[in-house]
Structure formats: structure tokens, C-alpha cells
Image (tube, rainbow, N blue to C red):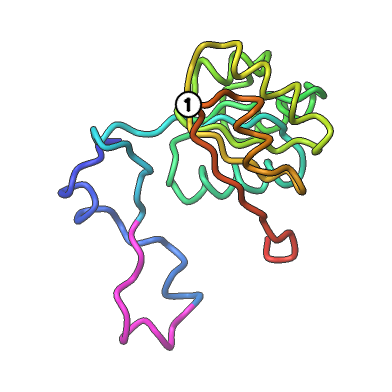
Amino acid sequence: AECTREFYEQAPLTADWHELAPQKAQQTTAPREMVLCSEGMVPVKVGFVGAGMMAGAMIRGLVSSKTCPADCVIASDAYQPCVDGLAEELGITSGGSNKDVALFADLIVLAVKPQMVEDVCADIKGSGTNPLVVSIAAGVTIESLEGWLGSSARVVRGMPNTPCL
């Protein structure tokens, strides 16, 4: 998908918007499908380290909303059947390792248990890349992430709310 102003202006309305919010349909402009792009208007490649329930929900949301094309998403997990299931269901790339994810992605979501984050960060740091890293691991501080990833790391922490999924 091309990420231009014209693309955004011509993007189709999401199919179910009017069904979900008919009372607001006349009052508000409907949301448009928008591809997540970099400054150069190139689709952002998103990697997930961890492919469990939370990562799966996030990946499904990105792909089904067309925010990120399936060919721009890669995932890895210690339990390969999780990744294979998402790859089969959504058409994403199944990464064989955390390093594969780091080499592919512009943005990496750390969706692993807190006790695994340090090892995962070592894999990312060892790839020689510098992606934006978004951690959803509970209790892992930005200072710890920066220490494990290196001083030039770009780090964001977030805490998703499972009941909202």
C-alpha cells in the first residue's frame, strides 16, 4: 500500500463503522483505513517477540484493520506452533529467531514474560540493528531495557488491558 495523502483521502471507510455507531454516523466523520508508515511514507515493518495471547490480539488488530499489511509483520516465539498458527491464519511471516525479527522489523514489540526480556534484548542487540522497541512486559523498567539494548536504544513501555480486547 502506498502511504500518501491521496491514499488516506481515498481510503475506503471501514465496513462496520456505520453498523457499530449508527447514532454518530451523521455527526462524525467515519474513520479511514490507514497504513502505519515511516517519515518516508514507507510501510513500517512490525516484529513481535512473543506470539501468545496478547501479541496475537495485537497482530490480529493491526492486520485486520489494515493498519499494517500482513507481509510487514513478523513474529517469533519460543513455542513455534503459536507463530505458525498466526502465520497460517493471518499471512504474517514466521520468524525463526528473535534475531530474524530484529533484522526484519523497524519496530519490535516485546511480548514475552518479564523474566525473558533480558535474553530477548541480548538477541536484538546482537543483531546490530536499532529498531524502536515497545515493551509490554510488566514490571520491566525503561532503564533496564536501555541497559540491555544499549545506550542508543529507542524504547517505549506500554501496558495493554486484556479485558478491552
Residue drawn at 66 percent across, 48 percent down: 57
Q: Residues within 10 Å of mark 1 (few under 14, many from 20)?
A: few
Q: Position of residue 12 (x, y in %)?
A: 30, 56
- In the rendered image of this protein, does residue 87 appear above or below residue 129? below
Q: Position of residue 51 (x, y in %)?
A: 72, 34
Residue 102 point in image, percent of width and height: 55, 20
| Secondary structure, magenta segment, majority class | loop
Q: Report the residue marked by disc 1.
A: 152
Q: Position of residue 50 (x, y in %)?
A: 72, 32
- Please, is residue 23 above or below residue 5 in the view? below
Q: Which quadrant: the N terminus?
A: top left
Task: Count numbered badges in the picture.
Answer: 1
Q: Is residue 118 left or right of residue 24?
A: right
Q: Give the residue drawn at x 34%, y 70%.
A: 30
Q: Amino acid at mark 1?
A: Ser
Residue 42 appears in which quarter of the rendering?
Answer: top left
Residue 25's quadrant in the figure?
bottom left
State the residue lying farthest toward the left.
Answer: 6
The quadrant of the picture occupied by the C terminus is bottom right
Dot 1 falls on a residue whose secondary structure is loop
Question: In screen coordinates, is 159 left or right of 46?
Answer: right
The quadrant in which residue 2 appears is top left
Q: Residues in magenta?
A: 21-32
Indicate whether residue 47 is drawn in magenta.
no
The residue sitting at 17% across, 49% down in the picture is: 5
Q: Which residue appears at 48% of the width and 16% of the height? A: 129
Q: Is residue 126 left or right of residue 113?
A: left
- The residue lying toward the viewer, choosing from 22 and 153, is 153
Residue 28 forms part of the magenta stretch: yes
